Image (tube, rainbow, N blue to C red):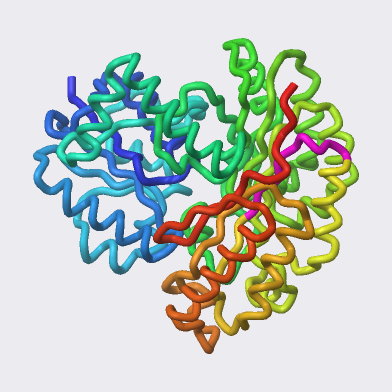
Amino acid sequence: MKKVFIYTEHVCEKRKLDGKKVQFYLEKNGYEIIDSPSKADIIFISSCGTTDRYTQETFDILERFKKYKGEKIVIGCVPKTDKEKFNEKFKGKSVVTDEMEKIDEIFPENKIKFKEIDDGNVLTSCLDDGLIKEKIKKKLLKNRLTKKAYVDLSTYILKLIVGENHLLLGNLARVPIDDIYFVRTSWGCSQNCAYCGIRKATGKFHSKPIEICIDEFKKGIDKGYKKIFLPADDTGAYGKDIGLTFPKLLEEFLKFEGDYKISIYALNAVWLVKYVEELEKIVKSDKISGISVPVQSGNSRILKLMNRYHDTEKMKDAFLRIKKANPNVETCTHIIIGFPTETKEEFKDSIDFIIDSKINMGAILKMSVKSGTLAEKIDPKVPEEEIEERAKMAYNLLKKHGYKVTRSEFGMVFGGKYKIKKG
């Protein structure tokens, strides 16, 4: 029986779900999944190619894992988003996000094929005990009491800064998420944003059959989960390829009784505007706890350059309609600082948009031009020092309007305003 270690510490929830499916696949074919890379015969390393910074993190991890004897297999987005660099730096086997079934070619002896495995509904979590900080974290998580203290403290701090639905921004604290059930509704993306390279790796958009979505949702409810997350690269596009709509899917979910809440992740603004009337009715059910809508800019000209939905007034109106329909629904967004050609005033439009739309929380990210994207060809680029200046401006303006803000190397997160009412 070969021993396998699956490393997904640094990737998004969707890639962690892929990691969980790989785990199921290997377990059903007789492999043993272990929690230490030093003892593994095979090491899977998931990868993120969202920006060049995340791609470099993948390369750094590959370099670090060279000390382990196990065969390395890379899964995720980098083998396709950064194909040339990846092939220079890594000579082993890999499986790209939109071709996960090709894992069968690496394990031809496996009787149970990858397509026969159910999708993951919980996240993988394996730590590299060769890295000091992860070794300490691993020890804390092994004991029930220290795990609870570690997770509780991390989430308490995030709740203070961002709010109850801090996970709409992703797992910022990188703690185990044991109380959330994930129902992935689709794969791929129907958008073509100028700054994003992930579409290369996630492939053509396709929806999960509605009967499977409903079955997975029911299983989560039956298992006693109170928090249900709907993650996808283009969540609101659900059904466009199978004659259905995203609101129809939500309506099917809401037919189930129970003490649960749904969080909607990565609902592109075009779908928020298109379905706002249906969403108003749905949020009145009080079963939706939060909606993440990454608008990326509050300026129409910049949004056009980004190849994104660009009617800022309709977006603002949609946010306000959702809040009016149910003030307890927390809204979340992402904004990019310094997209090529953006002026300081145009960036200020983004901050005004957050405030005017009564958005609860969000992330403001420094522009990192991804190699090979349309944004790479747009000039002039905004200098790094100007991006830093705008980050300071955003920090001060958000603080002035009552948000709690914390800065980091990638930008900042903000929240703590228009909080969910208790009870």
Q: Residue at x 40, y 46 (%)?
A: 11
Q: Residue at x 60, y 30 (%)?
A: 183
Residue 45 located left or right of residue 359: left
- Residue 211 visible, this angle: yes
* Residue 212 to residue 342: above or below: above
Residue range in magenta is: 325-333
Residue 44 located left or right of residue 277: left
Q: Which residue is drawn at 77% across and 34% down?
A: 328
* Residue 249 to residue 199: above or below: above
Residue 303 located left or right of residue 36: right
- Residue 21 visible, this angle: no
Question: In x, y percent, where is residue 166?
Answer: 57, 40
Residue 193 located left or right of residue 244: left
Question: In x, y percent, where is residue 355?
Answer: 73, 59
Q: Residue at x 39, y 31 (%)?
A: 124
Residue with the most extreme bottom position:
380
Question: In x, y percent, where is residue 146?
Answer: 32, 20
Question: In x, y percent, where is residue 386?
Answer: 49, 80
